[in-house]
Image: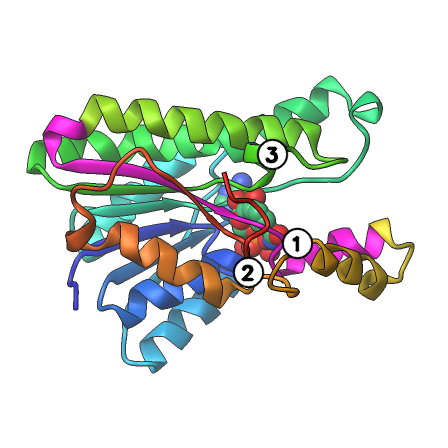
Amino acid sequence: MSNRVALVTGGAQGIGKGIATALGADGFRVAVADLNLAVAEETAKAISAAGGEAIAVEVDVTSTESVQAAVATIQHELGPIEVVVNNAGWDDFMPFVKTTPEFWDKILDVNFKGALRVIHAVVPGMAERGFGRVINIGSDAGRVGSSMEAVYSGAKGGIIAFTKTLAREVAGKGITANTVCPGPTDTPALRKFADGAGGGDAEKVIAGMTRAVPMKRLGTPEDIGPAVAFFASDGAGFVTGQTLSVSGGLTMA
Ligand SMILES: NC(=O)c1ccc[n+]([C@@H]2O[C@H](COP(=O)([O-])OP(=O)(O)OC[C@H]3O[C@@H](n4cnc5c(N)ncnc54)[C@H](O)[C@@H]3O)[C@@H](O)[C@H]2O)c1
C-alpha cells in the first residue's frame, strides 16, 4: 500500500473516477479535481466510504490561476503532490472540415495545454523532493487516428510525444512520465457521442465500436484504473516515456 498524495484531474466521473478509485484502494491519498465540484465530492466520499482517503477540489485545467490555486489547496490539505494524473478531457465529434479555429483552441486548451499547466505547477516540487510520477491520459486516437476526432487525435498525439520528452528531461530527478491510452471506454462522454452519432440509437453505435475490439467489449473505467496505478507505484520507478494502450487489443503498436 502506498501513502503518497495523488492528484487526478477530471476525477469526478468516467475514467477519472475509475483512476481515483483504484489509487484510493491502493492507499494513495487522492485529490479528485474537477470542473464539477458536486460530482467530485460524491466520488471523494465514495473513496472514503470504501476505506480510502480522498478530497474533492474544484479546478478548471484551461485556467493557469485555477490550476495553481487547486495545487496550493491540495498541498495544504494533503501535503506535497507526488503523483499527478492528467485525465481531464473534452471532445465533440465532427469531420475536420466542419471544425472552426475556436473549436481547435478549446480542444487544445483542455486536452493538451491542460496537462501542461498542471505539470508545470507540480513538477518543480517533485524534482526538489527527488520523486514524482506523471501519468497522462492519451487515447488510441492519438496513436492510430479516429474518424470525426481529427483535432482531438492531434492533441492526444501531442500528449504522447510531450510525455516522452518530459520523461527524458526529468529522468535524473526521480520522476517518471508515461501515457495510458484508453480505447473506446464506457463513460458519460462516450454515451453522449454514441447518442449524437447514432441519431438517438446509441446502442447501434456502441455495437459497431465493440465489433472492432478483439475482446468484443468496450473498456470500463475499472479497466483503466489499474494500469494507471501501476505507473503510479513505487515499483514502476524504472519505467518511463512509455505509451500503454488499454483497449482490449484494439491497438497493438
Ligand atoms: N471514453 C473514452 O472512450 C475515451 C477513450 C480514450 C481516451 N479517453 C480520455 O479519457 C479521459 C476521460 O474521459 P471520459 O470518457 O471519462 O470523459 P467524461 O466526460 O466522462 O469525464 C471527463 C471529466 O473531466 C472533467 N473536465 C472536463 N473539462 C475539464 C476542465 N477544463 N477542467 C477540469 N475538469 C474537466 C469533466 O467534468 C468530467 O468529470 C479524457 O482525457 C479522454 O480524452 C476517453
23 with respect to 236 (left or right) = right
Identify residue for label 3.
Answer: 144
At a point 36% along the width and 47% down the height, the residue shown is 85
At a point 65% along the width and 60% down the height, the residue shown is 188
What stretch of residues is rendered in magenta?
A: 171-196
> Tell me, what colour scheme is on the image?
rainbow
Q: Amino acid at mark 2?
A: Gly
Say few, some or many: other residues with alpha carbon within 10 Å of mark 2 (under 14 / 14 to 19 / 20 or more).
some
At a point 59% along the width and 50% down the height, the residue shown is 250
Q: Position of residue 113 (x, y in %)?
A: 47, 27
Identify residue for label 1.
Answer: 189
Q: Amino acid at mark 1?
A: Ala
Q: Which image quadrant for residue 205?
A: bottom right
Foreground of the two, 65 or 107: 107
Alpha carbon of mark 1 to alpha carbon of mark 2: how far? 8 Å
Q: Amino acid at mark 3?
A: Val
**Quick check: is 194 in the magenta stretch?**
yes
Identify residue for label 2.
Answer: 14
Q: Earlier in the sequence, mark 2 or mark 3?
A: 2
Q: Is mark 2 within 8 Å of ligand 1?
A: yes
Q: Is residue 221 visible?
A: yes
Above or below, 170 against 232 in this view is above
Q: Earlier in the sequence, mark 1 or mark 2?
A: 2
Alpha carbon of mark 1 to alpha carbon of mark 3: how far? 20 Å
Q: Is residue 19 visible?
A: no
* Dot 1 and dot 2 residues touching (CB under 8 Å): yes
Above or below, 238 against 121 in this view is below
Q: Position of residue 221 (x, y in %)?
A: 51, 63
Assign a secondary structure to mark 1: helix
Assign a secondary structure to mark 3: helix
